[in-house]
Image: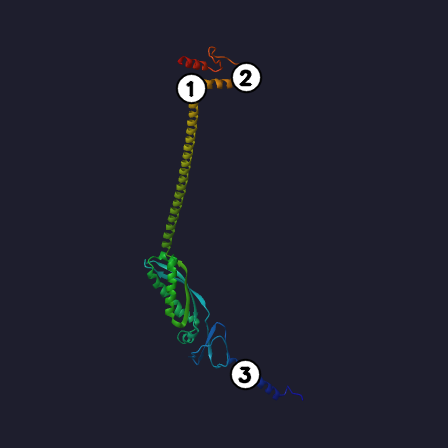
Amino acid sequence: MSIAWDSPKTIVQLCGVGVFALALLVVGYNITKTVPAGYVSVATLFGNVIEEPYTDGLHFPVNPLYRWTDYDVREKSFDVLQVPMPTSDQQTSLIDISVQYRLNANACASAKSNIGVAEDIVNVKITPNIRSLLRSEGKSISRCEELFSNIVQQNMQTNLAANLQMKIGDYATITAVLVRNIQLPEHILNAIKSKKVREQAGEEQKAELARFKTEQQQLVAQAAAERAAAEEDATKRRTLADAEAYEIGKINAALASSPAYIQLRALETLDGIADDPATKIYFLNGDSPTPLPLMHLGETVIRQRKEE
């Protein structure tokens, strides 16, 4: 059986099948909804918001007349730059703030009804409130220089995160508020730099003084060591001199009391002289009973005999 493709009836039938298939595709597409991971979708029907949001995944069937608004509920961060922050000293600094947050999926339908899309939540709820809170936070800081203190910054970040969460309610969860940059007034910066220069000069002077003190202590210690060594050497010399004087005294006492000792030492001397063939012996006192080559020894002996 052959089909007459060029007949008007056949063409109409084919067109009808194509239209029907296209209608099925359109209807099938409109009755399914795919929500990407990390998003929720809020449906509206004729301007009315459907309270239950659609979470990520495939949803089938859905009303083909719905209109969809997607909300990214992943954690995000945005910066609020150059926010004026007056402190109690009547000085105004400029602060850069980063806010980390994520939209609450269950509040997206309410946000759609009362605020708008995700960007509207940031622009309406987060940015104005963080600016206002930052200005209020500055009132608790007495001087703008304290903004560089780690403790002050930590307290400020904690307070800003807690107060901002109360301001925005359930629309989003604030995970952190971070201070990124602090710009003090120009004259305050110049004063701080001058103070730092003076402090650095003072620290250098302290270091130089400590070095000089250490050197002087080393010199004093060295002088004390040298003095102790000199005293020890003097004591040693005195001890040796005393010993030598004692020995000489003993010898003199022996000489005075024992002529035999003198004769013994004279004989030892003669024995040493005799060993040298070039030695000449001169008798200095011929009247001495001990003609020795030693001057005046005989006189001592004669004087001792006369005394006896």
Mark 1 vs mark 3, foreground winner is: 1
Q: Is residue 260 above or below residue 42?
A: above
Q: Residue at x 40, y 72 (%)?
A: 171
- 3D distance between C-alphas at marks 1 and 3: 154 Å
Tell me which amino acid carries mark 3.
Leu
> Image point 42% across, 19% down: which residue?
257
Please report whichever mark, 3 or 2, sits nearer to the chain's N-terminal start: 3
- Which residue is label 3 attached to? 24
Q: How many marks?
A: 3
Of circles 1 and 2, the one toward us is: 1
Which disc, if any, is residue 274? Answer: 2
Colouring chosen for the image of the structure: rainbow
For label 3, the SS is helix
Disc 2 secondary structure class: helix
Q: Label 3: how many residues lie within 10 Å, few (<14), some (14-19) or many (20+)?
A: few
The image shows residue 28, relative to residue 197, as above or below, that is below
- Secondary structure type for disc 1: helix
Q: Position of residue 204 (x, y in %)?
A: 40, 46
Specify the amino acid type for callout 2.
Ala
N-terminal label among 1 and 3: 3
- Image quarter in which the C terminus is found: top left
Q: Position of residue 114 (x, y in %)?
A: 39, 75
Q: Name the N-terminal-most of marks 1 and 2.
A: 1
> Residue 257, which numbered label?
1
